[in-house]
Amino acid sequence: MKKCGLIAVVALFFLSGCDKQQLDTYSLAPLSDYFPLQTGKYITYDLDSTTYPNFGSAAVITHYQVQYYTDSTVTDNLGRTAYRIIRYIRDSATAPWIPDNTFLAINTGNTIEWIEDNLRFIKLNRPILAGSSWKGNNYLYTYTADTANQVTPLIYLDNWNYSYDSINTSLTLGSLTIDSTFKVSEVDNEIGIQNDPNFYSTITYSSENYAKGIGLVYRRFLFQEYQPPVNGNPGYYNTDGYGITLTMIDHN
């Protein structure tokens, strides 16, 4: 019995050592492993864009392809080295690419900052540990700076608590199976009674998945606000709502 007990203790120690080694591998990994920044790199995605036009009663989903191409290094307004990323878009696989937006990405060593339409997001944060969290939208002005402290149009981005989960898991995207990925859960809020046209409701959801040696491989975002019928007027979706689903289909 004592011998069996000793074997069990040794086995437990060995497994604990393996878990710790895996934990250290991720927690100590540089963010560049999961968000590589180098000129000439690209990732191509299928993009499903959700909009709510004309205060309508249903969402409209439009399909595109987009490619994020790392074009060059620049200096940001804080004097840091940043990578300029150009987004190209087309409405079918045979159509020509058209540039439609430009972003900046900065690896500070401890964070990955992403600047889009003059909005700064903290996409990744060290260490990469399950449950580790940070305020990814902390640089955004969701309230006015005056004494009235009123909300701004960015209020739906307020106080998001990013956190890691599903670390070191494989992810299947269509015909692609990608090893060594993790998920960043950013927000998952619902208000009101969903799918009932007689009640007010909102959905705010955002998450991203990153793969080692590749970068962002999947993103899902949805901001939706529904107003119920009032005084004989039909219910409608607020036109400020929108959604994005990015699914990687190619990279170099």
Image (cartoon, grey):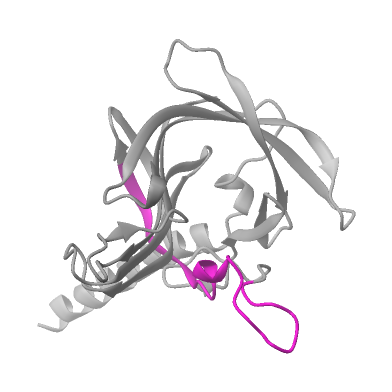
Residue at (53%, 76%) from the top-left corner?
A: 159
Total numbered labels: 0
Residue at the far left in the pictured view: 1
Residue 82: give x, y in percent of width and height. 78, 45
Q: Is residue 31 left or right of residue 144?
A: left
Residue interval drawn in magenta = 142-171
Q: Is residue 164 left or right of residue 234?
A: right
In front of the other: 124 or 236: 236
Residue at the far bottom in the pictured view: 147
In front of the other: 245 or 201: 201
Residue 238: give x, y in percent of width and height. 40, 58
Q: Is the residue 55 above or below the residue 126 in the image?
A: above
Quarter occupied by the C terminus: top right
Q: Is the residue 203 above or below the residue 46 in the image?
A: below
Does the magenta-highlighted stretch encompass residue 167? yes
Q: Quadrant of residue 228?
A: bottom left
Residue at (21%, 72%) from the top-left corner?
A: 193
Residue 168: give x, y in percent of width and height. 38, 53
Q: Quadrant of residue 202?
A: bottom left
Q: Is the residue 249 above or below the residue 80 in the image?
A: above
Residue at (74%, 38%) from the top-left corner?
A: 84
Quarter occupied by the N terminus: bottom left
Does the magenta-highlighted stretch encompass residue 118? no
In front of the other: 229 or 188: 229
